[in-house]
Image (cartoon, rainbow, N blue to C red):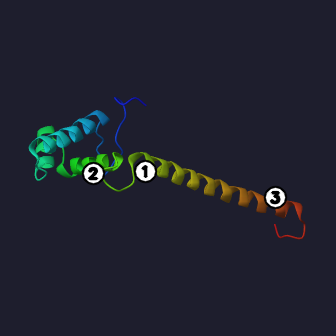
């Protein structure tokens, strides 16, 4: 998927924002902090300028810091991989239950001593 069409995952209110907006907003916060030396209030000011929720932008900035190794935490890439693996585990468990049921069914059909 290209960066221009990539969407951020749904969180909170369920709104999706284009990846370009997310990257631009995070960059604006980081540049403003660097230029002014301030941290307090920068996220809120940038969020208002861009029409975003300040908590949404604050989350994006924190996640960008994790992704860049500036803050401990699970990277976006790792979060995506974990979600993929969790989905795969659910699918495999479901397939395993189906196979167990089929196995029990065929065992009853083939063994006349078992109740049908």
Residue wearing tag 1: 79
Q: Nearer the viewer, mark 3 or mark 1?
A: 1
Q: Which mark is residue 62?
A: 2
Tell me what residue is drawn at x 15 percent, y 48 percent: 43
Mark nearer the N terminus (1 vs 2): 2
State the image coordinates of residue 109 (x, y, percent, origin top left): 85, 60
Tell me what residue is drawn at x 51 percent, y 48 percent: 84
Mark nearer the N terminus (2 vs 3): 2
Circle 2: element type: helix
- 7 on left or right of 82: left
Residue 79 visible at all? yes
Mark nearer the N terminus (3 vs 1): 1
Residue 14 visible at all? no
The quadrant the C terminus occupies is bottom right
- Please tell me how crowded label 1 is: few (under 14), some (14-19), or many (20+) other residues with Cα within 10 Å: few
Tell me what residue is drawn at x 89 percent, y 65 percent: 111
Residue 7, image quadrant:
top left
Q: Which mark is residue 106?
A: 3
Tell me what residue is drawn at x 90 percent, y 66 percent: 112
The quadrant the N terminus occupies is top left
Calculate the distance from the C-alpha at mark 3 to the C-alpha at mark 1. Answer: 41 Å
| Residue nearer the viewer, 65 or 54 | 65
| Residue nearer the viewer, 32 or 13 | 32
State the image coordinates of residue 107 (x, y, percent, origin top left): 83, 62
- 37 on left or right of 62: left
Circle 1: element type: helix
């Amino acid at each position: 998927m290209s960066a221009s069409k990539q969407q951020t995952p749904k969180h909170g209110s369920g709104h999706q924002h284009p990846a370009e907006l997310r990257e631009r907003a995070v960059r604006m916060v980081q540049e403003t902090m660097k230029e002014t030396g301030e941290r307090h209030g920068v996220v809120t000011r940038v969020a208002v300028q861009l029409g975003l929720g300040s908590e949404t932008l604050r989350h994006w900035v924190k996640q960008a810091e994790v992704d860049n190794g500036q803050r401990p935490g699970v990277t976006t890439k790792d979060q995506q991989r974990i979600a993929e693996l969790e989905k795969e585990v659910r699918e495999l468990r479901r397939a395993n239950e189906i196979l167990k049921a089929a196995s029990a069914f065929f065992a009853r059909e083939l063994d006349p001593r078992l109740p049908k």
